Image (tube, rainbow, N blue to C red):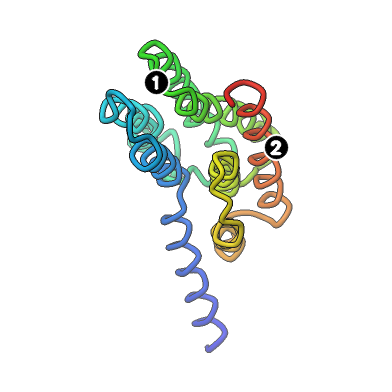
């Protein structure tokens, strides 16, 4: 009985951490922090944040809710590997539109870069998911950690803690295997680093 309660408690903790460190929340926080905390002289700050938030979070959430309502996915997390493909395709489209608009209004290059990374990382994950399930949570958080690292926010241990908590939450909820979790971390770091360094920084 004690083991069952302990297991249920761990699962609840993992679920809470998964919601707190959800890719949508990580994306929103990343845009908000960079736009409002690091760019004191940026023009049209509110507009740029709204566009970033709208295309990276609002539209993907609306798409997932619509797909769930239509019975095209069974749950909001799209736990089934094959069911993830359609939401990710919509996400990639929204990121592309967001990137084009941010570029047209001449937003800061790093904001364009983050939206572009979201687009390319989503395409990479879509291609992988066609054959194998990978942790989008750890990929998203590791991408965010890489962005802050490149911008000189070298708080190594807090970043490592957040990344570790994300990985553990996916494991204890049985959402992913260890290899799927680690693969998300590695791809998130390498892909984001390469794109930003080669194209935007």
Residue at the (29%, 29%) spot, across then down: 45
Eyeballing the image, is 7 above or below 26? Answer: below
Residue at the (59%, 31%) spot, across then down: 121
As helix, strand or loop, the secondary structure at mark 2 comes to helix
Disc nearer the start of the sequence (1/2): 1
Residue at the (41%, 38%) spot, across then down: 34
Residue wearing tag 1: 107
For the residue pair 76 and 158, the one nearer the viewer reads as 158
Q: Quadrant of the C terminus?
A: top right
Q: Which label is found at residue 190?
A: 2
Q: Is residue 195 left or right of residue 99?
A: right
Question: Where's residue 143, x and y in %?
Answer: 58, 41
Eyeballing the image, is 73 above or below 96? Answer: below
Residue sitting at the far top: 104
Q: Residues within 10 Å of mark 2 (few under 14, many from 20)?
A: few
Residue sitting at the far right: 179
Question: Where's residue 183, x and y in %?
Answer: 71, 46
Residue at the (63%, 40%) spot, across then down: 188
As helix, strand or loop, the secondary structure at mark 1 comes to loop
Question: Where's residue 62, x and y in %?
Answer: 32, 33
């Amino acid at each position: 009985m004690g083991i069952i309660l302990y297991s249920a408690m761990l699962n609840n903790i993992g679920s809470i951490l998964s919601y707190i460190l959800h890719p949508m929340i990580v994306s929103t926080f990343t845009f908000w922090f960079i736009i409002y905390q690091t760019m004191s002289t940026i023009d049209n700050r509110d507009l740029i944040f709204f566009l970033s938030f709208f295309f990276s979070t609002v539209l993907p959430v609306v798409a997932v809710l619509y797909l769930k309502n239509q019975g095209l996915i069974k749950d909001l997390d799209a736990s089934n590997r094959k069911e993830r493909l359609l939401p990710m395709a919509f996400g990639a489209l929204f990121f592309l539109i967001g990137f084009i608009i941010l570029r047209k209004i001449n937003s800061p290059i790093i904001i364009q870069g983050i939206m572009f990374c979201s687009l390319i990382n989503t395409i990479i994950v879509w291609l992988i998911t066609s054959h194998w399930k990978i942790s989008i949570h750890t990929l998203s958080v590791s991408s965010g950690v890489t962005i802050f690292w490149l911008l000189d926010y070298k708080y190594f241990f807090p970043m490592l803690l957040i990344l570790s908590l994300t990985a553990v939450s996916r494991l204890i909820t049985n959402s992913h295997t260890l290899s799927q979790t680690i693969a998300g971390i590695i791809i998130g770091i390498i892909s984001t680093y390469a794109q930003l360094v080669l194209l935007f920084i």
